[in-house]
Image: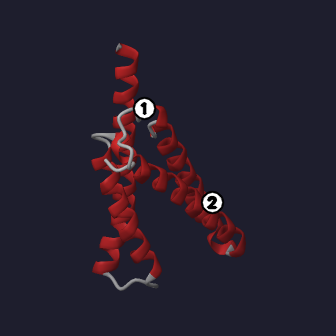
Amino acid sequence: MAPAFNRERARMVGLALVGFLIFVFAIIPVVQSMLHAPRGTAGPMLNSVLATLGIFLVLAARDPAAHRSLIVFAVWSSFAHAAIMLVMAFQLPAQRGGLLFAAGVTALSAILLMICMPTRSGDVNVPATGVR
């Protein structure tokens, strides 16, 4: 029983940590854009969505199995975001270093979220409708 408990506890801590880091690193540019006029509008808008996702990942850490679809969304949206940044890194040579670093960090966070994601086999008490 202890290894399963430790695994679940590690999953909860990992999920909360990744969610918190996503929130922190997304909210900083949002606050900066409110204090100083941003160069564009897409960045602050995307970062506000990411900050919101981070908050919900922290909340999902309480019961990861009940919020599996949110975690799956976070994983795949992070992979998609990393892929777009990777392509942009080769299109914008002046920003290549920053974009490659950000793509790597985003892909790493997706991998960590994937590790923290509960398996479907744990869903033994799911009602026939699939709604919890």
- Quadrant housing residue 65: top left
- Mark 2 → mark 1, Cα distance in angstroms: 36 Å
Q: Whole-percent x and y of residue 85?
A: 61, 66
Q: Nearer the viewer, mark 2 or mark 1?
A: 1
Which numbered disc, 2 or 1, marks the residue that appears first in the sequence? 2
Amino acid residing under circle 2? Leu
- Quadrant housing residue 47: bottom left
Q: Which residue does the image show at 52% across and 60% down from the upper left? A: 77
Amino acid residing under circle 1? Gly
Which residue is label 1 attached to?
122
Q: Residues within 10 Å of mark 2 (few under 14, many from 20)?
A: some
Q: Which residue does the image show at 58% across and 56% down from the upper left? A: 79
Q: Residues within 10 Å of mark 1 (few under 14, many from 20)?
A: few
The answer to whether residue 125 is above or below residue 73 is above
Residue sitting nearer the eye, 18 or 100? 18
Looking at this rendering, what residue extends furthest in the top direction? Answer: 1
Q: Name the secondary structure under disc 2.
A: helix
The answer to whether residue 73 is above or below residue 66 is below
In the picture, the disc for residue 100 is 2
Residue sitting nearer the eye, 130 or 48? 130
- The image quadrant where one finds the N terminus is top left
Q: Whole-percent x and y of residue 99?
A: 60, 64
In the picture, the disc for residue 39 is none
Task: Indicate the colouring scheme.
Answer: secondary structure
Q: Name the secondary structure under disc 1.
A: helix
Residue sitting nearer the eye, 93 or 119? 119
Looking at this rendering, what residue extends furthest in the front direction? Answer: 128
